[in-house]
Image (cartoon, grey):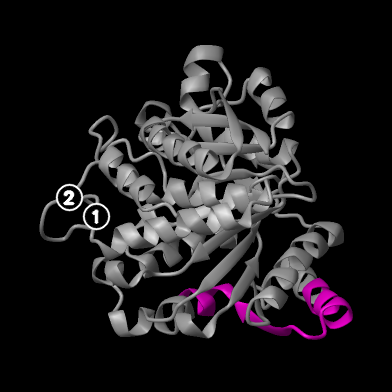
């Protein structure tokens, strides 16, 4: 197979973790007889500096023509003024919207070798295997907003169609796993959440009768996610709730540096990125954890290119590296930590 992959290193540690991941993809291509072409473009803060906008038209056009997009991270203190009219995060929101990527999949499966890095008791983490599906293109992040000297507003709006498509994606995923779907809302207060709950119930009842649906309020879910994480299989929720809950779920894995994500739509093209940020405090030091980005590349192979065996080989190689305690600084509570490139090389050496 030949595939065109657009690479968006972005800001902070983004260029470091992406440059460590590309050799992994190249190694997989050599082993399995594929050809991957990489095109690098700007997004986020670096795009603001070079082009004046967080998402240049050239970047968007390249992404539209690609088979998949691999992204590092955006943002940093240089562009952190919340009152600025142009911000790096706008580029990320805009490219997801433009490509029609409405479902963000974030797997959470703590690795046994990394349980000691989590602040959660190890006994609660054994056997945890969750996928959180976050709606990406609706809700309060995209609603109308106003600001005056005396007040401000952000409108949260959802349509039936927006809810239907992300619930279908999550329910289909649950059907392929353990058959349990948890829908998270705030239906005791918010009208958008009441609509969400009604639509989710109808879709599962009519189209996925073999899937068990459970509703949870977002505040109780925030508690249950840490107190009984083994109880959950697939979790689907709206944009802002998903943004918060997935960062909370990173505590289950022990480090943000282990959690991958895929942003998907109706087609095969998706954006694949680690869920962590740009970590400006360690940028340029060569110590960032590349495993989340490498695991995101595995999701790229699976979801956009249909290369299941190749994706599984990367996941197995990362698991083997962790078994061998090849830990970057975020995981190495005691003992010697490897650098970014050494961690990536450990994965390459363990590829099947």
Query: Within 10 angstroms of label 1, few (less than 14), some, or many (20 or more) residues?
Result: many
Q: Can residue 253 be found in the magenta stretch?
A: no
Relative to 351, 288 lies left or right: left
Q: Position of residue 244 (x, y in %)?
A: 50, 60
The part of the image, by quadrant, that contains residue 96 is: top right
Give the SS element for disc 2. loop
Circle 2 residue: 337
Q: Position of residue 336 (x, y in %)?
A: 12, 52
The vertical placement of 237 against 65, above or below, is below
Q: Position of residue 351 (x, y in %)?
A: 42, 52
The stretch of residues the image draws in magenta is: 199-222
The vertical placement of 270 against 199, above or below, is above
Disc 2 vs disc 1: Cβ atoms closer than 8 Å?
Answer: yes
Q: Position of residue 321 (x, y in %)?
A: 31, 57
Q: Is residue 352 visible?
A: yes
Sequence-first disc among 2 and 1: 1
Give the SS element for disc 1. loop
Relative to 170, 51 lies left or right: left
Query: Who's the residue at 47% across and 26% down the image?
Result: 45
Instruction: Please name whichever residue, 198 or 151, is drawn nearer the observer in this view of the structure.
Output: 198
Per the rendering, the mark at residue 327 is 1
Instruction: Check the picture and name the quadrant holding the C terminus.
Output: bottom left
The part of the image, by quadrant, that contains residue 236 is: bottom right
């Amino acid at each position: 197979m030949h595939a065109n992959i657009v690479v968006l290193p972005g800001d902070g540690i983004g260029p470091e973790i992406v440059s460590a991941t590309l050799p992994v993809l190249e190694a997989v291509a050599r082993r399995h007889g594929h050809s991957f072409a990489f095109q690098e473009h700007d997004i986020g803060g670096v795009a603001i500096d070079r082009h004046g906008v967080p998402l240049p038209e050239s970047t968007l056009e390249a992404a539209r023509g690609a088979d998949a997009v691999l992204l590092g991270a955006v943002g940093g203190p240089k562009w952190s003024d919340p009152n600025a009219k142009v911000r790096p995060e706008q580029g990320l929101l805009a490219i997801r919207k433009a490509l029609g990527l409405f479902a963000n999949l974030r797997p959470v499966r703590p690795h046994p070798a990394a349980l000691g890095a989590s602040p959660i008791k190890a006994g609660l983490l054994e056997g945890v295997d969750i996928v959180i599906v976050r709606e990406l293109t609706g809700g309060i992040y995209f609603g109308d907003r106003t600001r005056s000297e005396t007040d401000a507003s952000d409108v949260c709006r959802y349509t039936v169609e927006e809810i239907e498509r992300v619930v279908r994606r999550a329910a289909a995923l649950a059907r392929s796993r353990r058959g349990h779907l948890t829908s998270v809302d705030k239906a005791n207060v918010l009208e958008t959440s009441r609509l969400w709950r009604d639509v989710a119930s109808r879709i599962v009842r009519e189209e996925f009768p073999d899937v068990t649906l459970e509703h949870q309020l977002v505040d109780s879910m925030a508690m249950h996610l840490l107190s009984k994480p083994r109880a959950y299989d697939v979790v689907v929720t709206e944009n802002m709730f998903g943004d918060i809950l997935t960062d909370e779920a990173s505590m289950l894995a022990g480090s943000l540096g282990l959690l991958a994500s895929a942003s998907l739509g109706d087609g095969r093209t998706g954006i694949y990125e680690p869920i962590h940020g740009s970590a400006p405090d360690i940028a340029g030091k060569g110590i960032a954890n590349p495993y989340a980005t490498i695991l995101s590349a595995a999701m790229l192979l699976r979801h956009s290119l249909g290369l299941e065996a190749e994706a599984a080989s990367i996941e197995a190689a990362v698991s083997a590296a962790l078994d061998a305690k090849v830990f970057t600084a975020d995981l190495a509570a005691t003992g010697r930590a490897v650098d970014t490139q050494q961690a990536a090389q450990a994965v390459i050496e363990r590829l099947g």
